[in-house]
């Protein structure tokens, strides 16, 4: 029968050459490849003890920024949630009470702000949508693997960056040296 | 009857019609924007200057162009008038200036404001304005005044359109608030601490084109675009009872009057309907309300399907019954 594709090849069985029949040269050739790989530089790393350098434009774990006085920038406007293609962000807004001016920047703030890291596709649209420069995707952190699904729902306790100028995220609006000094002085005064 | 040409379209309207209403008989994108004019309110209009148009020929008798741009909401038509709105570069440039003017003292706190998403000023600025500001001076601020447990006043956002004043005069009656001060010191206030609690006073929330008067019971509850508007009615002894329920999940978060395509209230509703009946069981649901596709609220908003009966021949009987009760919307309506 003629082949339909005309690409069929006839298999022919040639008798082996002397080198092939000797068997051992092929064995040693294979072993030498194995030994060469044994001493080559390894392409894998021992994560998480060792980490690869991130690209500066890497989009990793989210952070909710604070301003120069340590107040939360987020006002729960919902633009990140409406921009999110994966619908990973939910929030509940609340009104700032008297005496909380040092905690929240605007009269409205997010009582709860949750990002489901399993839904999130790390596209960065929330960062683009934010009118208050509050949410950023960090270039040096990832959402680590976990065993339980509900551990991937990050609340404000894990998203908001620390007040201390030394532990702030590297993304977003950075404090000037003067602002950092003032904030440190303020924190020291509160501790004392 | 007067025959006018608006943006190249010939319209015949009764004498005494305003240019704005003549344009609205055609509809669509040629209609000048309105921030202060409100058809149901007598005396409204002529304040915000958003609707300025160019009259290139005054009338058949006197075809000279009008020297300045005229506010279309209070200028009545004359036979043979030629009006240019979207086709005139001068009008478009001036409108940019008007946006800038209205935004001079506006705090631009849209992320905090409850009106964001259905705000006339936001839409107006988005469509006609420029995206930057040249204004660097301090914006005016006010001492907060409490006008009662139902309505929240944010004077900083006010553009002084006077709509709420006319509403209080003509709809609610027994007006206790008004515009105090003159010029750049003008503000909405109650003069002596006073509470706005007339029966139809809640309508000032609906007529407010910006977020200056908002519903206190809905304050910061949800963003508008996360809620779903549903038409509903109830047997109300005071008003028509035809309202819009704004749902988030199973909860009615807010109740407003139904508005037409120009953002004008069709039927005024009473405060009982607006503030007190926030249970689904209080209402007879008619179905999802129509939301313009260009609106941010239309995200994830589902309406009855637009169906062509003759094409879909074998619809289930239940669907047919449902469609007869709630006829599908026509495309583009």
Image (cartoon, coloured by chain):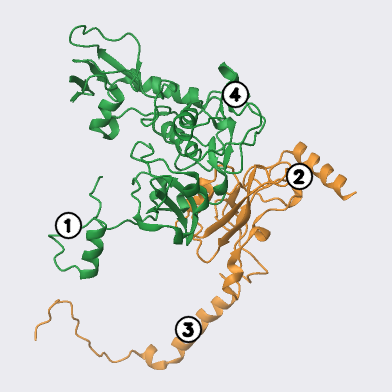
Chain colours: A orange, B green
Q: Hey, which quadrant is residue A186 in on the image?
A: top right
Circle 3 — which element?
A: helix
Residue linked to disc 3:
A30
On the image, numbered disc 1 is attached to which residue?
A: B308
- Residue wearing tag 2: A99
Instruction: Give the Cα distance between marks 2 and 4.
Output: 30 Å
Q: Around disc 3, counting alpha carbons within 10 Å, would you say few (fewer than 14), some (14 to 19), or many (20 or more)?
A: few
Q: Nearer the viewer, mark 4 or mark 1?
A: 1
The image quadrant of residue B283 is bottom left
Give the label, 3 or 2, closer to the camera: 2
Please tell me whether residue B296 is drawn above or below residue B126 in the rendered image: below
Q: Nearer the viewer, residue A27 or B105?
A: B105
Q: Alpha-carbon neighbours of circle 2 within 10 Å: few (<14), some, or many (≥20)?
A: few
Question: Does mark 1 fall on the same chain as mark 2?
Answer: no
Judge from the rendering whether residue B47 lies leftward or rightward of residue A56; answer left or right. Answer: left
Residue nearest the viewer, comparing B78 with A153: B78
Q: Secondary structure at mark 2?
A: loop
Does the CB distance between marks 4 and 1 fall below 8 Å?
A: no
Q: Of helix, strand and loop, which one carries label 1?
A: loop
């Amino acid at each position: 029968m003629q082949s339909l594709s005309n690409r069929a090849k006839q298999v022919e069985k040639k008798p082996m050459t002397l080198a092939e029949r000797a068997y051992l040269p092929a064995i040693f050739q294979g072993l030498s490849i194995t030994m060469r790989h044994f001493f080559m530089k390894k392409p894998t790393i021992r994560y998480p003890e060792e980490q690869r350098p991130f690209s500066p434009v890497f989009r990793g774990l989210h952070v909710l920024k604070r301003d120069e006085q340590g107040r939360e920038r987020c006002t729960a406007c919902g633009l990140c949630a409406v921009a999110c293609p994966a619908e990973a962000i939910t929030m509940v807004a609340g009104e700032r009470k008297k005496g909380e001016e040092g905690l929240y920047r605007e009269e409205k703030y997010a009582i709860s702000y949750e990002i489901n890291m399993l839904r999130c596709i790390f596209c960065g649209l929330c960062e683009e949508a934010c009118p208050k420069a509050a949410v950023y995707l960090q270039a040096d952190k990832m959402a680590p693997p976990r065993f339980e699904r509900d551990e991937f729902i990050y609340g404000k306790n894990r998203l908001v960056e620390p007040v201390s100028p030394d532990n702030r995220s590297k993304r977003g609006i950075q404090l000037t040296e003067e602002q950092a000094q003032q904030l440190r002085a303020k924190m020291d005064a509160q501790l004392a | 009857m007067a025959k006018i040409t608006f943006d190249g379209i010939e319209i015949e309207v009764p004498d005494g019609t305003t240019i704005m209403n003549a344009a609205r008989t055609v509809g669509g994108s040629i209609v000048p924007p309105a921030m202060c004019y409100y058809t149901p309110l007598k005396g409204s209009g002529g304040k915000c200057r958003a609707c300025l148009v160019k009259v290139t020929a005054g009338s058949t008798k006197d075809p000279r162009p009008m020297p300045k741009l005229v506010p279309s909401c209070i200028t009545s038509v004359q036979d043979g008038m030629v009006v240019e709105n979207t086709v005139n570069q001068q009008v478009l440039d001036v409108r940019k200036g008007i946006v800038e003017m209205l935004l001079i003292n506006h705090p631009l706190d849209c992320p905090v404001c409850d009106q964001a998403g259905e705000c006339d000023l936001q839409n107006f600025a988005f469509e006609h304005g420029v995206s930057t500001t040249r204004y660097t001076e301090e914006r005016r601020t006010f001492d907060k005044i409490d006008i009662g447990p139902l309505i929240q006043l944010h004077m900083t956002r006010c553009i002084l359109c006077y709509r709420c004043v006319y509403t209080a005069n003509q709809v609610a009656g027994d007006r206790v608030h008004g515009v105090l001060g003159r010029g750049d010191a003008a503000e909405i206030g109650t003069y002596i601490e006073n509470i706005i609690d007339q029966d139809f006073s809640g309508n000032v929330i609906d007529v407010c084109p910006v977020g200056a008067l908002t519903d206190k019971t809905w304050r910061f509850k949800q963003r508008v675009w996360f809620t779903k508007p549903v038409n509903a009615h109830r047997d109300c002894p005071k008003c028509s009872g035809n309202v819009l329920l704004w749902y988030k999940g199973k909860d009615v978060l807010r109740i407003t009057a139904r508005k037409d395509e120009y953002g004008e209230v069709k039927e005024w509703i009473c405060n009982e309907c607006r503030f007190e009946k926030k249970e689904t069981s209080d209402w007879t649901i008619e179905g999802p309300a129509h939301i313009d596709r260009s609106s941010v609220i239309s995200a994830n908003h589902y309406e009855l399907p637009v169906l062509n009966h003759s094409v879909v021949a074998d619809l289930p009987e239940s669907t047919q019954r449902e469609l007869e009760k709630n006829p599908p919307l026509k495309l583009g309506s």
